[in-house]
Image: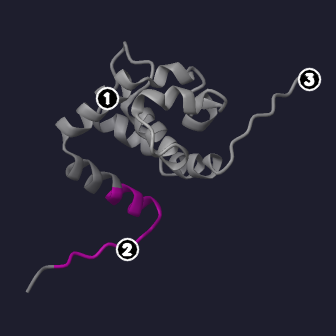
Amino acid sequence: MQMKIERLDHLGVVAGILKELELSKEIDALLPPTDDMKASVGECVAAMILCGLGFSQTPLSLTPHFFEKLPVGFLLGNDQLQAQDLNHFKLSRSLEKLHEYGCEKLFAELSHKACQKESVGLMLLRPG
């Protein structure tokens, strides 16, 4: 039996929360991936969240460098992904798709689903 040990640091905890909330799946349901995509929009968003926690002051073009020594497939839930799949072209196209969909709309839908999953009570507040 062979084992490979890889370092996760705090990223394992955050990746676990993203998986529990099914963030990538929820985004991909709203913005379906095409056949030519190695990494879906949801996986790119998860990658940018993880990268932002450990590599926040660097440009998107260095994202593959951040993931070089990390188990990308394990962290993002897709064993087919490699660090070079998360290049700045792919991440930029994903950000464009998010913008086209509407960031506020996406946030509202994702946060509502997350609250439902975690049984957080929702109240509608009206001004006045």
How far apart are labels 2 and 1 at the CA level? 35 Å
Q: Residue at x 33, y 19 (%)?
A: 34
112 drawn magenta: yes
How far apart are labels 1 and 3 at the CA level? 41 Å
How far apart are labels 3 and 2 at the CA level? 47 Å
Q: Nearer the viewer, residue 10 or 28?
A: 10
Tell me the tag on residue 92: 1
Measured from the top left, where is residue 63 in percent x and y? 48, 31
Q: Secondary structure at mark 3?
A: loop
Query: Amino acid type of disc 2?
Result: Gly
The vertical placement of 100 against 113, above or below, is above
- State which tag comes first along the sequence, 1 or 3: 3
- State which tag comes first along the sequence, 2 or 1: 1
Measured from the top left, where is residue 113 in percent x and y? 36, 55
- State which tag comes first along the sequence, 3 or 2: 3
Query: Amino acid type of disc 1?
Result: Ser
Q: Is residue 34 left or right of residue 74?
A: left
Tell me the tag on residue 38: none
Measured from the top left, where is residue 80 in percent x and y? 57, 20
Crowdedness of circle 1 by 10 Å Cα count: few (<14), some, many (20+)? Answer: some
Q: Which residue is mark 3?
A: 1
Query: Amino acid type of disc 3?
Result: Met
Q: Which residue is mark 2?
A: 121
Q: Quadrant of the N terminus?
A: top right
Magenta residue span: 111-125
List the single residue furthest toward the bottom. Answer: 128
Q: Is residue 77 left or right of residue 104?
A: right
